[in-house]
Image (tube, grey):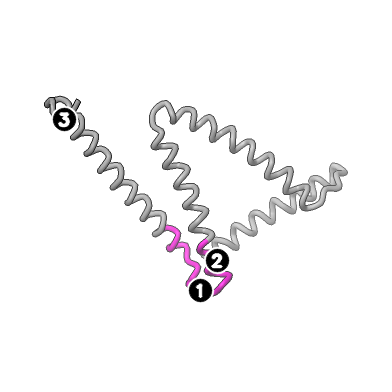
Amino acid sequence: MNSSLKLITRILNYFHDKLVLLTYHFGLKLNDKQLHFLVIGLLGIVLFVFVHQLFKYLVRYSLTAISFIYTFTVLVVLVFAIEIEQKLTGRGNMEFQDIVEGLWGFLVAFLLYLILRSVAWFLKKLFRNQGILR
């Protein structure tokens, strides 16, 4: 996990340094806060447009798909936060496998949910066809 975080940190630092150099060459005197404002603002709006279009497409077929994507995204952030907290406080071990196992647990639980939901739908349809339900 440490090596993965160090690699991500090196990549982010590389792009950060290149962006600082680029703004300097254009004569822009932006501080770190202003760079964060512009980069995250631009990245966020591009991501929003992409996600919005994806969700508009998916909602025609299944609201469950949108709920799954949102929940999975929140869980990814949460499990990374838990592992980082463990590293910072020294309580527990920061391990990538913990992240994988936690997300795998959600995927299995979601699969069980889909199975139960499908069985309920099938039984409801069967009972309606038999005249037991209206």
Q: Position of residue 124 (x, y in %)?
A: 20, 32
The structure residue drawn at horizontal position 30% and vertical position 42%, both measured from the top left corner, is 114
**Whole-number angstrom distance, CA of label 3 to CA of label 1:** 52 Å
Q: Which residue is mark 2?
A: 85
N-term-proximal mark, 2 vs 3? 2
In the figure, is residue 128 to the left or right of 49? left
98 in the magenta segment: yes
Chief secondary structure of the magenta span?
helix
The structure residue drawn at horizontal position 79% and vertical position 46%, both measured from the top left corner, is 22
Label 1, secondary structure: give it: loop
Label 3, secondary structure: give it: helix
In the figure, is residue 109 to the left or right of 3? left
Q: Position of residue 70 (x, y in %)?
A: 47, 43
Residues at badges 2 and 1 in contact (C-beta under 8 Å)? Answer: yes
Q: Which residue is mark 3?
A: 126
- Along the viewing direction, whichever of 62 and 42 lies nearer the viewer: 62
Label 2, secondary structure: give it: helix
Q: Is residue 11 above or below residue 38?
A: below
Quadrant of the frame with the C terminus: top left
In the figure, is residue 66 to the left or right of 11? left
- Along the viewing direction, whichever of 63 and 97 lies nearer the viewer: 63
Q: Residue furthest bottom?
A: 90
Q: Which residue is mark 1?
A: 91
Residues packed near mark 3 inside 10 Å, few (<14), some (14 to 19) or many (20 plus): few
The structure residue drawn at horizontal position 33% and vertical position 51%, both measured from the top left corner, is 109
